[in-house]
Image (spheres, helix red, strand yellow):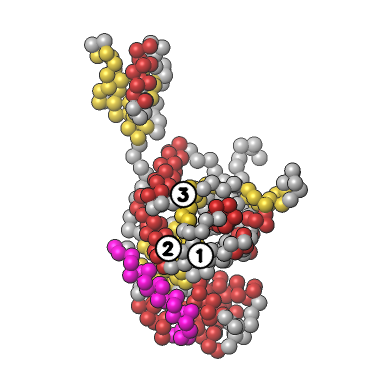
C-alpha cells in the first residue's frame, strides 16, 4: 500500500472546498456572535470518562480511544463537542445566569454515520445554558435557521419531535435497557414489524400507543391526531403543546412533525428538531433540549442547542464565487513592492505573477491588474 493513501472516509480538503469551508465557518461564527454567543475551543482529546459521561452507548462506539503516555489513563478523541461544552459551562465558567456558547472544530468518528460521509466532520454548534423555558428552544431554532440562511441554503424545512412522548409511553413498563434501545431504533426507522416483535410482551395500552407513533408524522394535523390516539398523560400533553408553540413561531418556514424520531445521541431530554434542505437526503442540522447533560459534571442546568457538519453543509449548497484579486508583476523594484504592499494593507488580494507562469489558473478571480502608467503604478480593470 502506498504511504500516502489515507484511511477510509478520511480525505484531504483541497483549495476550492477549503476556501468554501473557511468562508462558511466565519459566517456561522459571525451569525452566532450576533445572537450573543461566546466562542469556546474545547480540546480534541480528553480523559475518556469525562468525554463519555452521560452520553450513552452510541457516542462510546463512535469514539477513538488511546492510552495517555504520560498518565497511563485512557483518552478519547471527541466524537461530539456537546459534552465538552457542558463540562465548560458546569465546571469552568460556573455562571449563575444564562450562558450562550458556540464552537467550531473537528470531531472524529470510528465509523461514518451514513454512506459516503467523512469520519472527520467539522462540527459547528451553539448552546444555551441556564434557561428551561421555551424561549431558549425557540432562540436556538431561529439561530440554526439564520445559520443556514448565511450558508445560502434554499428553503430550509424544520422537522420537530419530542423524546418525552416515548419516555412517557415507556414509563413504568418493565423492559431491559437493550430492549428500550431497540424500540427507539425501530421507531426512528419506522420498522413496524420490528416494533411489533419488540413490544409483544408489553401491556396493551403501551404496545398500541408505540405502534401508533410510527404513523404520527406529517403536517400540523399530526399533533391533533396524537391527542386522540395517545394516552392522555400530562407529559405527553405538555410535549405536544410545546411542539405546537414552537411551530407557531416559525414564520415563513415549512414545518413538519415526526413524533417517532429518536435519532441522535441519548442525552436529549425534550423537544428536538432536524432541519433539511430540499435537495439533502439527510438533515443538515440536528438539535434540541438536553437538560441532563451537565449533571454528570456536578451541575445540572437547563440546556438546549444544535450542531451541524460544516463539510456536509458545503456539499449541500452552491459553490461561492471566487474572491476578486489584483494581478501584479513580480519585481524587485522598490516602487512596485511599495504599491503592492499598499494595496494589501487596504485589504486587497494581490497575486504576483512569477516569471513563466502568466497563464496559470488559481482560486482567485483576477479582475484587475497593477500596471505602470505615466511612471505611476495604478490598478486597472482587465
Q: Check residue 302 in the rendering and tell me which mark sits there, or answer none.
A: 1
Report if residue 240 lies within the magenta region: yes
Could you give the CA–CA distance between mark 2 and mark 1, rounded to whole angstroms? 9 Å
Could you give the CA–CA distance between mark 3 and mark 2, rounded to whole angstroms? 16 Å
Q: Check residue 263 in the rendering and tell me which mark sits there, or answer none.
A: none
Most extreme residue toward the front is: 96
Q: Is residue 307 above or below residue 370?
A: below
| Percent of width and height locating residue 354 | 42, 19
Report if residue 185 lies within the magenta region: no
Q: Check residue 136 in the rendering and tell me which mark sits there, or answer none.
A: 2
Residue at 37% from the left image edge and 49% from the top image edge: 34
Labelled pair 2, 1 in contact (Cβ < 8 Å): yes
- Quarter occupied by residue 86: bottom right
Q: Mark 3 — residue?
A: 38
Q: Is residue 40 above or below residue 233?
A: above
Q: Residues within 10 Å of mark 1 (few under 14, many from 20)?
A: many
Left or right: 309 in relation to 337: right
The part of the chain drawn in magenta is 229-252
Q: Main secondary structure of the magenta part?
A: helix
Residue at 53% from the left image edge and 66% from the top image edge: 291
Amino acid at each position: 500500500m502506498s504511504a500516502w493513501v489515507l484511511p477510509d472516509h478520511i480525505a484531504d480538503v483541497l483549495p476550492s472546498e477549503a476556501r468554501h469551508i473557511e468562508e462558511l465557518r466565519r459566517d456561522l461564527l459571525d451569525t452566532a456572535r450576533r445572537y450573543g454567543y461566546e466562542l469556546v475551543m474545547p480540546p480534541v482529546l480528553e480523559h475518556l470518562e469525562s468525554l463519555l459521561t452521560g452520553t450513552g452507548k452510541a457516542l462510546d462506539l463512535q469514539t477513538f480511544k488511546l492510552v495517555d503516555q504520560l498518565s497511563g489513563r485512557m483518552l478519547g478523541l471527541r466524537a461530539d463537542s456537546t459534552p465538552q461544552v457542558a463540562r465548560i459551562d458546569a465546571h469552568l465558567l460556573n455562571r449563575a445566569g444564562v450562558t450562550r456558547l458556540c464552537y467550531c472544530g473537528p470531531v472524529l468518528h470510528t465509523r461514518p454515520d451514513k454512506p459516503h460521509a467523512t469520519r472527520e466532520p467539522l462540527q459547528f454548534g451553539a448552546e444555551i445554558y441556564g434557561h428551561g423555558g421555551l424561549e431558549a428552544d425557540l432562540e436556538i431554532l431561529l439561530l440554526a435557521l439564520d445559520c443556514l440562511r448565511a450558508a445560502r441554503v434554499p428553503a430550509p424545512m424544520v422537522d420537530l419531535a419530542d423524546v418525552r412522548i416515548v419516555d412517557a409511553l415507556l414509563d413504568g413498563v418493565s423492559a431491559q435497557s437493550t430492549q428500550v434501545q431497540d424500540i427507539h431504533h425501530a421507531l426512528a426507522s419506522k420498522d413496524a414489524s420490528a416494533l411489533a416483535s419488540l413490544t409483544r410482551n408489553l401491556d396493551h395500552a403501551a404496545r398500541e400507543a408505540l405502534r401508533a407513533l410510527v404513523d404520527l408524522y406529517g403536517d400540523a394535523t399530526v399533533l391533533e391526531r396524537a391527542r386522540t390516539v395517545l394516552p392522555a398523560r400530562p407529559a405527553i400533553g405538555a410535549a405536544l403543546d410545546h411542539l405546537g408553540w414552537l411551530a407557531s413561531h416559525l414564520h415563513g418556514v415549512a414545518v413538519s412533525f415526526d413524533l417517532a424520531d429518536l435519532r441522535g445521541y441519548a442525552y436529549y431530554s425534550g423537544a428536538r428538531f432536524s432541519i433539511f434542505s430540499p435537495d439533502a437526503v439527510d438533515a443538515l442540522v440536528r438539535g434540541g433540549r438536553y437538560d441532563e447533560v451537565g449533571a454528570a459534571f456536578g451541575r445540572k442546568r437547563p440546556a438546549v442547542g444544535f450542531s451541524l457538519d460544516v463539510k456536509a453543509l458545503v456539499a449541500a449548497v452552491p459553490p461561492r464565487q471566487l474572491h476578486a484579486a489584483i494581478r501584479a508583476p513580480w519585481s524587485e523594484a522598490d516602487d512596485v513592492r511599495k504599491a503592492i504592499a499598499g494595496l494589501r494593507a487596504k485589504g486587497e488580494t494581490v497575486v504576483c505573477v512569477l516569471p513563466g507562469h502568466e497563464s496559470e489558473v488559481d482560486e482567485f478571480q483576477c479582475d484587475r491588474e497593477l500596471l505602470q502608467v505615466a511612471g505611476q503604478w495604478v490598478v486597472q480593470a482587465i
